[in-house]
Image (cartoon, rainbow, N blue to C red):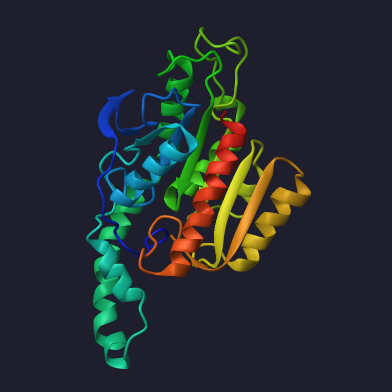
Amino acid sequence: MSCCKGGTVHHGEAAGREDTMHGINVYITRPANNVTPKGIIVFISDAFGWKFINSRLLADKYAAKGQFLVLLPDFMNGNEMSTAMIPVLNQFETPASLLTTIFIKPLLAVRIAINGIPFALKNLFRHAAIADFIRALRASEPLFETKDLKIGVVGFCWGGTHAIRLAHDDPRTQVRRHGSQATSGDPAPLVECAFAAHPSMLRFPGDVEKVALPLSVVVGDLDSQLSEENAWKMKEILEVKKKGDHEVDIIAGAKHGFALRLNPDNENEVANAELAEQQAINFLTKWVT
């Protein structure tokens, strides 16, 4: 199934809290010591949803290092993939003996399909809800004192494609900002910028060619969801053809999910994930401060 790849579940205690915002459950994390955030980052999760500890710990890093208010909403409305599927996916993806390949892997494939197909069907049309949530953030009184609220979006795997689509800046999604904002008069884009890590279920090249707002993408050259050839085509479209405020980083040796589901005991995976994390923070700092 698209977006369903394995990895490692991390350990740690998330620093934020859960709340309800604009009718959606949200994990909220912010800078320490009551520092006023520089802006809001909406974190769109991978297939494992808003409760996935990996996503919450990474959201905490964005809040601490970038000094952002980070919101990780339940855009899947409780229909995320279970993290219990991660070891099953790992076993399915690992090269095995001929007997295991013949007799065990078909059973694993069935189990993956039983879990993956409902996930895909239930979350097929979530983009409107994502846009509505961000629109509500724009139109409401800001969550902290500011005269120019800036919002960025980050997305991983399933969420990466939604982040790219938010960078299309469809005029139908634009909104008048809250009256307290200096730019509240004319309709404005939902977000200032978007960052996408190893997007899955991407309509290529259409989703890329429609990009209008600043977009940063990181992908591995071994990504099973976006071929290396298409990754380089994406880089050409965004950095050369459009000549806008876009960037695409293609990391050698990195696989799908590397920015979020890395193995913390693997030095190469840790290094690649840190590259993606720093790319995101640098890009967000440029556009959301």
Q: Residue at x 66, y 49 (%)?
A: 247
Q: Residue at x 56, y 54 (%)?
A: 218
* Furthest-bottom residue in this view: 98
Q: Quadrant of the C terminus?
A: top right
Who is closer to the viewer here, 162 or 243? 243
Residue 101 against residue 247 in the figure, above or below: below
Q: Residue 236 is drawn in which quadrant? A: bottom right
Residue 163 against residue 269 in the figure, above or below: above
* Furthest-top residue in this view: 179
Who is closer to the viewer here, 215 or 203? 215
Q: Position of residue 158 (x, y in %)?
A: 43, 50
Relative placement, left or right, of 212 versus 164 is right
Relative placement, left or right, of 159 versus 85 is right
Q: Position of residue 280 (x, y in %)?
A: 53, 45
Q: Residue at x 73, y 41 (%)?
A: 244
How many numbered badges does the structure rendering display?
Answer: 0
The answer to whether residue 46 of the structure is visible from this angle is yes
Q: Position of residue 85 (x, y in %)?
A: 25, 62
Who is closer to the viewer here, 94 or 226? 94
Q: Residue at x 64, y 35 (%)?
A: 213
Q: Residue 75 is drawn in which quadrant? A: top left
Q: Residue 187 is drawn in which quadrant? A: top right
Residue 45 against residue 185 in the figure, above or below: below
Residue 27 against residue 186 in the figure, above or below: below
Q: Quadrant of the N terminus?
A: bottom left
Relative placement, left or right, of 191 versus 35 is right
The answer to whether residue 169 of the structure is visible from this angle is no
Q: Position of residue 268 (x, y in %)?
A: 47, 69
